[in-house]
Amino acid sequence: MPRKIWMLDIAREQSPTLSHLYQYASHALESGYDALGLYLEHKFAYECAPWATGKGAVTRDMVISLQCEFPSLQIIPFINLLGHFEGFLYTEEGRQYREEIFTGLQACPSCPEFQKLCHLMLAETMDVFQSDLIHIGGDETYQLAKCDKCQARIPEGTEDPKAWLYAEHFRPLLQQVIDAGRTPGLWGDMYLDHPSALEIVPKETIIFDWQYMNGLGETSTKFSNFRVYGCPTLHVYNAPWMHVSGTEENIRAVAQDVHDLNLEGFCLTQWEGGLFGAYDTQLPAVKWAAQIADNPSNPTSLVDAHDEESGQRTWANIMGVELEKIGGVFKYSKLRNPLKARFLLYSNPFLCWMHHHEQLAGPQGEEAIALCEKALHYAPTDAEKNATIFVRSAIEFVRMADDARKLYAAGDADAAIGKLAPMRYLFENLEKAAKANYDRIGGSMADVYRCRTAKLHVETVIRRIRDYGRRELGYLPAFEVITNPRFMPHDQGCWWLVNKWANE
Ligand SMILES: [Zn+2]
């Protein structure tokens, strides 16, 4: 039987308390996992980087307590020591480590202070976590060789400069883990793009081959000299709630390949609890994945893994299967779901209207709202209810905004304001739901503030339409302009937008 890890991303603004961690550990054990992986980034309270400790970070004492309470479960740290360092880089003390200014998520591997910090973080991690496996990240380092310092270090004639920088950075870190008598783990993606970097990797290292759309057939053979974990995911980041069929196909395909290729293990990854991705709504899928890891031909479907009596199965089928069939913004794709990102991530929910009103203001929007209403009826607990209210609110927002735009364009500013006003209550209710997610499962506090910010923005837009919606400027700004946070009266040509430096 392959070893099974359930890896939980707590970096996306999650703030689990000790009791939440106990719940996750209990669920891991009950489901048959050998290990619970905590994907941390800046969400661990490092003594070597106290300046990066945000509220709600997991502490040394919490991890020690978790390990004492669950001695039969390995608690594996998943840290990141180059890419995905954004939680450090966008702080005042951490900005010195960045590869580029105000973009991306990678630190500079040629910054001596950063190299020193990596060794300190690694030492501290190994001091706190007792697991044999220490995962040191290494994924998505797309910004390699961007800065002058990195460019200058690359030896002349180097065939793949990115591979060279990557290998130089990780070689001593991998060695530090091995010297401590532990086993290092690394994500596999950068080696697929830069295979020569693999040449320096010690044979003791375990490669985590993450493949979320297919199985491992194309990739894991490239790591044939290493022990490999196959890593599927729950398709949450790309879904209004979760894409059930895509999740099922991915987990079955990876589990089958882990068996067929006789790999070391199976690591279920669960990402992005922000944007209302409440982890407790996904626990049945986590449990089901462990059964599939043991037996990829297990006939139980992912929908059937949900409890029927409580209504959870019907709810999961509506939110995870039926909604997807509408297509458009609900469809299965590899990208982050545009509905939820545009609704809450960019501090301007009107982006969601701009891109999706053609679909959502019409019959497909009505159909989606009807599905959400039905799902609410079957939702067994607040967890499922809140996940549903989030999706319904995004659709309703787009429809209200579209009504408002038509009235605004027709010159009826008062009636347009009348359509915008209820949006304030929509975001007030969502804020309550976000706060409930935070209390219940250690969900994203940023979501609470996202809702609050959206409501304030709606109030700003109402004020602007009151001030400029009757051609007070001589012209009527386009609806996507007057609703943009950077709208400026009299800047009729939108110079804040047309210049390509707009985000700098
Ligand atoms: Zn650099």
Image (spheres, rainbow, N blue to C red):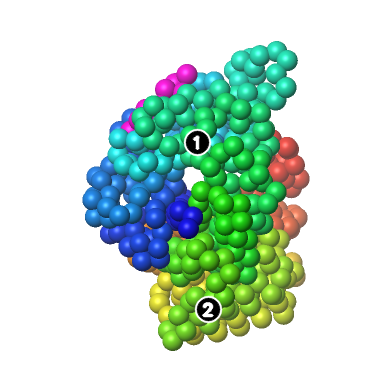
In the image: residue 428, left or right of residue 247: left
The residue depicted at 33 percent of the width and 54 percent of the height is 73
Q: Residue 412, how many percent across, how many down?
A: 69, 71
Measured Cα–Cα span from mark 2 to mark 1: 37 Å
Q: Residue 100, how many percent across, how many down?
A: 59, 29
Q: Which corner quadrant holds the C terminus? A: top right
What's under tag 1, amino acid-wise?
Answer: Thr
Label 2: few (<14), some (14–19) or many (≥20) C-alpha neighbours in 10 Å: some
In terms of secondary structure, what is the magenta stretch mainly?
Answer: helix
Considering every residue shown, the one lying at the far top of the view is: 156
In the image: residue 5, left or right of residue 156: left
Res. 133 mark: none
* Magenta region: 112-124
- Say which element carries label 1: loop
**Nearer the camera: disc 2 or disc 1:** 1
Q: Residue 194, how many percent across, how many down?
A: 67, 33
Disc 2, disc 1: CB below 8 Å?
no
Specify the quadrant of the image occupied by residue 307.
Answer: bottom left
Residue for badge 1: 205
What's under tag 2, amino acid-wise?
Answer: Asp
Q: Nearer the viewer, residue 401 or 149?
A: 149
Label 1: few (<14), some (14–19) or many (≥20) C-alpha neighbours in 10 Å: many
In the image: residue 121, left or right of residue 363: left
Q: How many marks?
A: 2
Q: Residue 217, how many percent across, how many down?
A: 68, 52
Residue for badge 2: 304
